[in-house]
Amino acid sequence: MKLTVKILFILVFNMLLLSCESKSRQDIINNELAYPMSIQTVLSKIGQPDSITTENHDTGVFGVRVNKIYHYGSNQLVFSPHNIYMGKK
């Protein structure tokens, strides 16, 4: 009986420990991404996006730039033409 209780306690403790260590994609997007971060760094932290779209951004004198928008669920992350994280849309 005591051995069963000890094993059960160890299993529950390990499950709680693992759940505390893993961060959700949403937590990383909200707390760990910052400008200027390269696209490679962002992808290594949160993985591949669900989809990618582009958006034309008129800069006036400098012409039109094409920003990439990476979609992660309801989050839209904007990257510059030079693959630098610009923030959430």
Image (tube, rainbow, N blue to C red):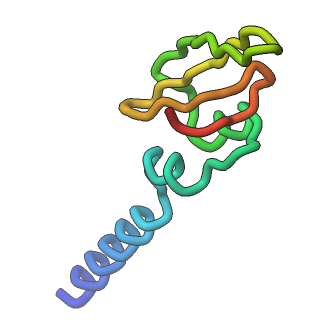
Residue 59 position by quadrant: top right
Residue 39, percent across and down?
A: 72, 31
Residue 77 position by quadrant: top right
Above/below status of 29 relative to 75: below
Q: Nearer the viewer, residue 38 or 14?
A: 38
Count of marks placed on residues: 0
The residue drawn where x is 17% and y is 86% is 1
Residue 86, percent across and down?
A: 66, 36
Query: In the image, is 12 to the left or to the right of 59?
Result: left
Above/below status of 15 relative to 28: below
Above/below status of 8 relative to 69: below
Query: In the image, is 25 to the left or to the right of 74?
Result: right
The residue drawn where x is 54% and y is 57% is 31
Residue 40, percent across and down?
A: 74, 33
The residue drawn where x is 75% and y is 32% is 84
The residue drawn where x is 47% and y is 25% is 71
Residue 69 position by quadrant: top right
